[in-house]
Image (cartoon, rainbow, N blue to C red):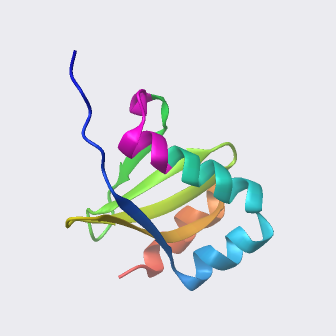
């Protein structure tokens, strides 16, 4: 039996993502649970994650019902998840062009 290594992680939010989550606290909790499952859970394959191919290739999105959360991973001793965008499906992809 393979034992999974415990991963330390931290979730940070940009202002625009935090503003969305202030009015959608239920989506924030779903997002936090999805990140936890990806990094430390027994079934990370159950989380709907895809790499987003834009100017930079280090963005990923998690699908949470009708919402999408875009994030980047910064590697180090602690994995830092920088939450870049969050919102309704169509809105998030329109705003992706503004990312650097």
- Residue at 53 percent of width and 63 percent of height: 93
Q: At 54% across and 73% down in the image, what residue appears?
A: 95
Q: Number of labelled discs?
A: 0
Range of the magenta residues?
Answer: 35-45
Is 46 or 79 nearer to us in this picture? 79
> Which residue sits furthest top?
1
Q: Is residue 97 left or right of residue 68?
A: left
Q: In the figure, is residue 53 to the left or right of 82?
A: left
Q: Nearer the viewer, residue 20 or 55?
A: 20
Picture coordinates of residue 76, whole percent (x, y): 20, 67
For the N terminus, give its image quadrant: top left
In this view, 30 is above or below 92 = above
Q: Main secondary structure of the magenta part?
A: helix
- Magenta stretch: includes residue 36: yes
Q: Residue at x 37, y 45 (%)?
A: 39
> Percent x, y for residue 77?
20, 65
Image position of 48 with respect to 53: above or below: above
In the image, residue 42 lies in the stretch drawn in magenta: yes
The answer to which image quadrant residue 27 occupies is: bottom right
Quadrant of the rendered image containing residue 87: bottom right
- Is residue 97 found left or right of 1 in the rendered image? right
Q: Quadrant of the C terminus?
A: bottom left
User: Which residue is farthest right?
Assistant: 23
Towards the viewer: 41 or 89: 41
- What residue lies at 60% left-to-right and 65% top-to-bottom? 86
Q: Position of residue 12 (x, y in %)?
A: 47, 73
């Amino acid at each position: 039996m393979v034992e999974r290594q415990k991963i330390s992680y931290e979730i940070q939010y940009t202002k625009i993502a935090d503003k969305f989550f202030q009015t959608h606290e239920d989506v924030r909790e779903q997002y936090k649970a999805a990140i936890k499952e990806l990094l430390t859970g027994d079934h990370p394959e159950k989380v709907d994650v895809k790499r987003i191919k834009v100017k930079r290739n280090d963005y990923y999105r998690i699908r949470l019902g009708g919402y999408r959360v875009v994030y980047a991973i910064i590697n180090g001793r602690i994995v830092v998840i920088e939450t870049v965008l969050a919102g309704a499906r169509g809105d998030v992809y329109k705003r992706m062009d503004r990312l650097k």
